[in-house]
Amino acid sequence: MNQTDPRTTPSADQRFHPSALYLVQLDPQSVVDGVRYDDTYLADEIRTCGTMRETCPVCGDGHLQLVLRQKNVRIPHLFCLECTRCFGAFLEDGTPALME
């Protein structure tokens, strides 16, 4: 019979109420290699890895996309396809939710 340690098993409350992420808008130049043109920032070959449950805190229209480190991405972050803003995600205690 398999038994789990109650100290390491998430409680029902934790399973059904996941922790909130605190989002901080990031300057795209600090997270992605690209070129600034007037009021936009262009970067080549950036792939998103999936849609998150969080919606954009600025435009509120779209769910944020997860962007992990890759050739042109220095820092993993969340990205809004609607308003093209980048966000860092942090847990309640201030630790980064997206590890390098």
Image (spheres, helix red, strand yellow):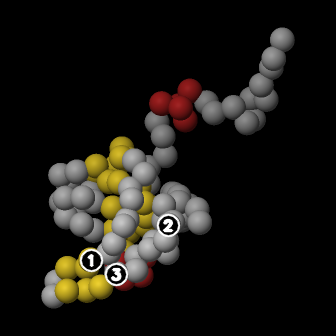
| Residue type beneath disc 3 | Gly
User: Is label 3 in contact with label 1 (beta carbons under 8 Å)?
Assistant: yes
Q: Which quadrant holds residue 37? A: bottom left
Q: Where is residue 80 in the image (x, y as percent from the top left)?
A: 27, 60
Residue drawn at the location 16% of the way across and 83% of the way down: 39
Q: Residue 42 carries which label?
A: 1
Compare marks 3 and 2 and give the one earlier in the sequence.
Answer: 3
| Residue type beneath disc 2 | Gln
Q: Is residue 57 positioned above or below 18 on the image?
A: below
Residue drawn at the location 59% of the way across and 66% of the way down: 100
Look at the numbered disc 2 and give the secondary structure of its residue.
Answer: loop
Look at the numbered disc 1 and give the secondary structure of its residue.
Answer: strand
Compare marks 1 and 2 and give the one earlier in the sequence.
Answer: 1
Spatial CA span between label 3 and label 2: 13 Å
Query: Badge 3: few (under 14), some or many (20 or more) residues near its Cα, within 10 Å?
Result: some
The residue to which callout 3 is attached is: 34
Q: Is residue 55 positioned above or below 41 on the image?
A: above
Q: Residue 70 carries which label?
A: 2
